[in-house]
Image (tube, helix red, strand yellow):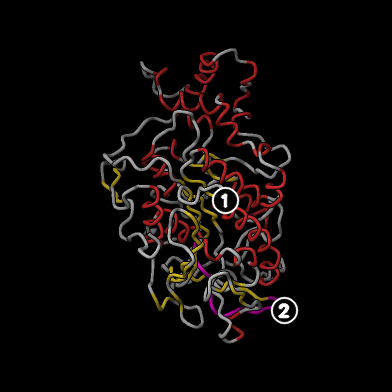
Amino acid sequence: MPASSCTGPLRRREFLRLGSLALGGLGLSDLLAARSSANDGLPQPDPDTSVILFWMWGGPSQFETWDPKPDAPAEYRGPFNPIATSVPGMDFCEVFPLQAKLGDKVSIVRSLHHTMSAHNDGSIELLTGKTPSPPDPTSTSKSEHPDFGMVASHVRGLRPDGLPRYVGIPKQPFMTRPTYLGVTHSAFATGDPSAPDFRPPALGLVGGINASRLDDRRGLLSQFDGFRRGLDARPDADADPFREAALQMLTNPGVASAFDLSREDPRLRDRYGRHLWGQSCLLARRLAEAGSTVITIDALAPTLSDRYFSWDDHINVQTRWDLGDATRYRSPFMDQALSALIEDVYARGLDRKILIVACGEFGRTPRLAHADGLIGRDHWPDAMSALLSGGGLATGQVIGATNSRGEYPTERPLSPQDLLATLYHHLGIPPHAEFLDFTGRPHPLLPHGEPIRELI
């Protein structure tokens, strides 16, 4: 496996600076400036399915999530024990007791693997299905191809009501770009839905526009035109579909309602958890139910000020980053939020419409590292796990297996492309269809991979 140059978790300030420079959320000015692109002859998919991705950036440990190894030597199995789920033989790490009760509503894939050992490279592999070439061990690489949410947005096209097809909560992963699909298909970034002053994005307009002062739709459009300076003029500008979609997003009460968490029963909001992950999962369900196609939850940390602000559980003596302590802190937030989302989706009869996925870009090294009384695990793309629920998939099963020390798959080895093919299948998108880049060169959505047959 290629060595990674990651030296461990960054200082919080350094991490936030990196993220702020690379955010890919869709701003209103970008939406207005974008141009339509052809649908490349792709067949029209089922318009009524959605994917919610709980994206665990940093690389969650397979041992401390859904592939515990209680019989492995102590330096491999880690500080936690397995617990039984509602499905015999499907054990989880003990830090997920609420998810364990829902074993019949989830499937666990334990045999995912690839070769990218740097964060951004691994993320690009998982989110786009394309292997970065060449790999960038500095973890500063950006995607040359759009991620699956951007693809879904492009294929399905703009909704008449202006509800974004692709939403990132609170932002989209910063290593992916829409590239040849166009900025219109970036994720709409919501901001922190757990913030006391969180409001639907339609209420916070850019450039000082105040929708409450506008008398009619065309009055708003005349102000939008100010954002188009420097762009190529078109005779049919008033018919620009992206311009109209932006207007719809800002003025349609149904769209605003989809983002409005105050409409939920306070007891349900409490069940999800009044923290970033909990309210993100609740907002994701609302948006999927309303018609958004892909919603990614950028699950870096349960609050934006956390000490353990990612899943990158190396030892860091300077910051006292410790895998055991990080897991004990982080897991209750995730267990509460993800279990509430799964239960809610099933209770509402949305379990065929909405597919829930939880994973990161790779797993962690089987052998624990030790330093100054701390423990940690490094990057390990040779074995990783993912949780899936809903989507009309077959649940209550474990797919694949790793060896007794969690080092590599021994049964049913699967790739990120197989996982993405499964998501595309749910969305009704042919996984091997092609898009053309700016030069006219065709690119398949996935170079290889097939939907995971055990799930379909």
- Amino acid type indicated by mark 2: Gly
Report whether 146 appears left or right of 310.
Answer: left
In the image, residue 361 above or below residue 281: below
Nearest the eye: 428 or 445: 428
Vertical position of residue 219 compared to residue 1: above or below: above
- Residue type at mark 1: give it: Ala
Q: Bin the neighbour count of mark 1 within 10 Å (Cα to Cα): few under 14, some 14-19, many 20 and up.
A: few
Which residue is under mark 2? 373
Q: Which of marks 2 and 1 is in front?
A: 1
Residue at image point 34% right, 47% down: 429
Location of the C terminus by quadrant is bottom left
Q: Where is residue 140 in the image (x, y as percent from the top left)?
A: 50, 55
**Residue 171: percent from the left, percent from the top?**
57, 45
Q: Residue 332 carries which label?
A: none
Residue 366 belongs to magenta span: yes
Total labels drawn: 2
Among the 4 quarters of the image, the one containing residue 454? bottom left
Q: Are dots 2 and 1 in contact, CB under 8 Å?
A: no
| Residue 308 in view here | yes
Query: Badge 1 is on which residue?
Result: 347
The residue range painted magenta reads 361-374
Residue 149 is covered by the magenta coloring: no
Q: Is residue 118 visible?
A: no
Q: Nearer the viewer, residue 121 or 108?
A: 108
| Neighbours of disc 2 within 10 Å: few (<14), some (14-19), many (20+) | few
Dot 2 lies on which element?
loop
